[in-house]
Amino acid sequence: MNRGDFQTIADIRIAEAQSLLAAGFFDGAYYLAGYSVECALKACIARLTNQHDFPDKEFAQECYTHAIERLVKAAGLTAQRNADAPPGSDLSDNWSTVKDWKESSRYEGNTELKAKALIEAITHATNGVLPWIKARW
């Protein structure tokens, strides 16, 4: 997969999450919404990769994760996020919501409220996590 693939999948997954939410499928909506952020962050990581460079093994292993915070770090976005999302800001609150997503959520029951909150934190036009990531992918 390449950067463009991850960008496309991120957009598709959030659209699918919104459709599932509207149809009342909250578990799937929650899971796919978080997956969109994972893919967006992996697009940022792919941007760091130079063609023909042999990847550092430790860095490569850090990238093969579903953990949002580890992906933010691997993408080199921690300092920028901290600067753009100071504690108490709407963007910080949205990141706090998103960081709790995990791959295993696909096995959990999620409420309508929880799915809506995650999707709003991800997609908010001015303080959403996905628009913030897209500005850097």
Image (cartoon, rainbow, N blue to C red):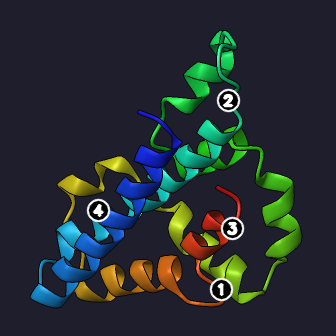
Check if mark 3's residue and mark 2's residue have beta carbons within 8 Å: no
- Residue 51 place in picture, x, y as percent: 65, 22
The numbered mark, 3 or 1, whose residue comes first in the sequence reads: 1
Neighbourhood count class around disc 2 (C-alpha, 10 Å): few under 14, some 14–19, many 20 upward: few
Mark 1 or mark 4: which is in front?
1
Rendered view: 19 above or below 3: below
The numbered mark, 1 or 4, whose residue comes first in the sequence reads: 4
The residue positioned 52% from the left and 81% from the top of the image is 121
Check if mark 2's residue and mark 1's residue have beta carbons within 8 Å: no
Mark 3 or mark 4: which is in front?
3
Tell me the quadrant of the picture where the N terminus can be found. top left
Q: Secondary structure at mark 4?
A: helix
How far apart marks 3 and 2 lie (CA) works out to 18 Å
Rendered view: 45 above or below 50: below
The answer to whether residue 133 is left or right of residue 6 is right
Q: Please tell me the numbered disc located at residue 127.
A: 1
The residue positioned 66% from the left and 71% from the top of the image is 132
Which amino acid is tagged 1? Answer: Asn
How far apart marks 2 and 1 lie (CA) works out to 28 Å
Tell me the quadrant of the picture where the C terminus can be found. bottom right
The numbered mark, 3 or 2, whose residue comes first in the sequence reads: 2
The residue tagged 4 is: 31
- The quarter of the displayed image where residue 34 is located: bottom left
The residue tagged 2 is: 49
Q: Please tell me the numbered disc located at residue 135.
A: 3
Which amino acid is tagged 2? Answer: Thr
Mark 2 or mark 1: which is in front?
2
How far apart marks 1 and 4 lie (CA) works out to 21 Å
